[in-house]
Image: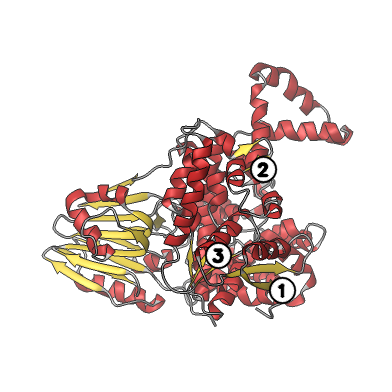
Amino acid sequence: MAELPRLRLFGATGPSLRAEEMKARALSAFAHHGGSGPLLLSEPGTALAVASAPGHWLETAQGVCVALCGRPDVSALPLAGADPARRIAAAYADEGPRLLQRLRGSFALAVTDLREHRTLLAVDRMGIESMCFAQSDGGLVFGSRADTVAHALGAPPEIDPQAVFNYLFFHAVPSPGTIFRRVSKLLPAQYLELRDDETRLDFYWRMRYADRAASNSGALAERLRRVLPEAVARQTDDGPVGAFLSGGTDSSTVAGTLARLRKDLVDAYSIGFDAPGFDEMSYARRAAEHFGLRHHPYYVTPADVLRAAPLIARAYDEPFGNASAVPTYFCAKLAQEQGMRALLAGDGGDELFGGNARYAKQRLFEAYSVVPKPLRRALVEPLVESVPEALLIAPARKVKSYVTQARVPLPDRLETYNLLVRADLSEVFEPDFLAAVRPDDPFSLMREAYMRAESASAVHRMMHLDLKQTLADNDLRKVNVMCRLAGVEARYPMLDDDLVALSAEIPAAGKVRGSRLRPFFKDALRDFLPREILEKQKHGFGLPFGIWLREHRPLRELALDSLAEFRRRGILKPGYLDKLVENALGGHASYHGVMVWVVLILELWLTFNQAGADDRAATPQPASRARGAEAHRP
């Protein structure tokens, strides 16, 4: 069995917590997840236990302790030549939390000043690393894994029913919540400062979009072509490094840039599927041929999925239902077996340069707002609603669908096709569970990130939402954990701070123009990327789980057994689970198969994480209480 991802950082601090208690919590956390022993500091009236995993940094100086993980860029901080934690400690002594504005790269950071009883927690601008925390009696517990923080609170962890609902909605638990009551996680570019008994949460950096071009597009394109190799070079400064290669714009850009920088052959790793509409290996092969990459394809099979499901459920600190974690794991595993230390991923390019198809689609719906509101309400909408669906011919049916969707404001409209949005929730969830949650909470989370964007452009607001929801909450967690499970490190050149800053200067029209996605980026790299890659439709590492569910008996048995076990948890109605399986095994395998996988992973995760625990922790309480690889292929 693969070695599970290690805990990267853990700590506990507080004036009312005893030193021995702190030490015991840190030792227990690292005994469970691996890592170095804790560093213990104690002074009259305060205690601290902090530890970081091997390969990261831990520093104490003059009553200040710094624990740090990731790949931080501290070049703007004092004490050049010292290790990153020491440089942060020195900057903190002079600047306090303001030092975060000069800290770049990927990081999770904890600074505790025992002299002033102050603790600072922070994560990087894009949320590549993670930081979870919880208020404890007399102090603060924090760490890189939500499950470790939950267990360190001293009582059996309790599952939050709202987080379960949000997981079923988004297929991952969105920040700032976690699957556990009392445990939260920082948003990208957010920090927490605890001083005495007062807690402050704020952002030390914000994405500032340019709604109008601030500089010549030709100069911006030249800058992009200069910054890209610099960003890739910053991620390849040590050991054997390869690249993911899906055949999409970003992975091809990253792998091709790496090939141009290296004198020796660059190894690129791709995933294929023997399922119509899912295999994109031809594009990956074209990119490998174009850039002279040493190409390593791997074809995932249903048997691979069967083996990977329990590994995935064990590896994550929270349930994680994105099925593309499976191909990501096998791709990373192949790279590790061939000696790679790290893999460069293309994640982030779509969210920074405008590559998601929904951006163009939603602009069409936004055009409906041009029609005067009185005319819409008095004429268009009553007319559309008055004609029964059965009487509409195809063109009229499309008009009705358009008006119906256009009436829903952004960002809520992005979830129009969500299975839970289209369903009657009273027919999906058990009454006690539904009474314990706020069904509108997923939309509230979306609206907060959407409205926080410093831009009047709907495209920029959607991209800002995706930086949090699609990237930090989902894709980065997927790639990070699966790479760690496989024994390699994931790195993200497209999220380089200079590239992020450059992307913000591109106006919305340079990101989405009509139905064309990423016009600025693709035009700037037209002489670099092969034509087939520039013109292809966005795809990714999607998994044909629904199709294989019907075709592969052992995989189907795992799913059916898991859903049968899930019935006892009092969350989804048995009738809904029956209908879900019926639809997944019928004519809607791909659509309904996604939810089967999401529930399967949730059940496996709950089983693995509650072995030996009281069954009450597995079932959310009613509202009255709740609110208080088989083979390579050539």
Residue 551 is situated, as x and y percent measured from the top left of the image, at 79, 71
Q: Disc 1 residue type?
A: Pro
Give me the C-alpha separation between circle 1 and circle 2: 30 Å
Q: What residue appears at the point 44 percent right and 54 percent down from the top-left corner?
A: 496
The number of discs equals 3
Q: Mark 2 sits on what residue?
A: 416
Q: Give the mark, 3 or 1, whose residue is nearer the N terminus.
A: 3
Q: Disc 3 residue type?
A: Ala
* Depicted 283 relative to depicted 628: above or below: below
For numbered disc 1, what is the local secondary structure? Answer: helix
For numbered disc 3, what is the local secondary structure? Answer: helix
Q: Give the mark, 1 or 2, whose residue is nearer the N terminus.
A: 1
Q: Which mark is residue 302?
A: 1
Residue 269 is situated, as x and y percent measured from the top left of the image, at 61, 70
Q: Give the mark, 2 or 3, whose residue is nearer the N terminus.
A: 3
Residue 52 in sight here: yes
Q: Which mark is residue 259?
A: 3
Q: Nearer the viewer, residue 33 or 102?
A: 102
Which quarter of the figure is the N terminus placed in? bottom right
Q: Disc 2 residue type?
A: Thr
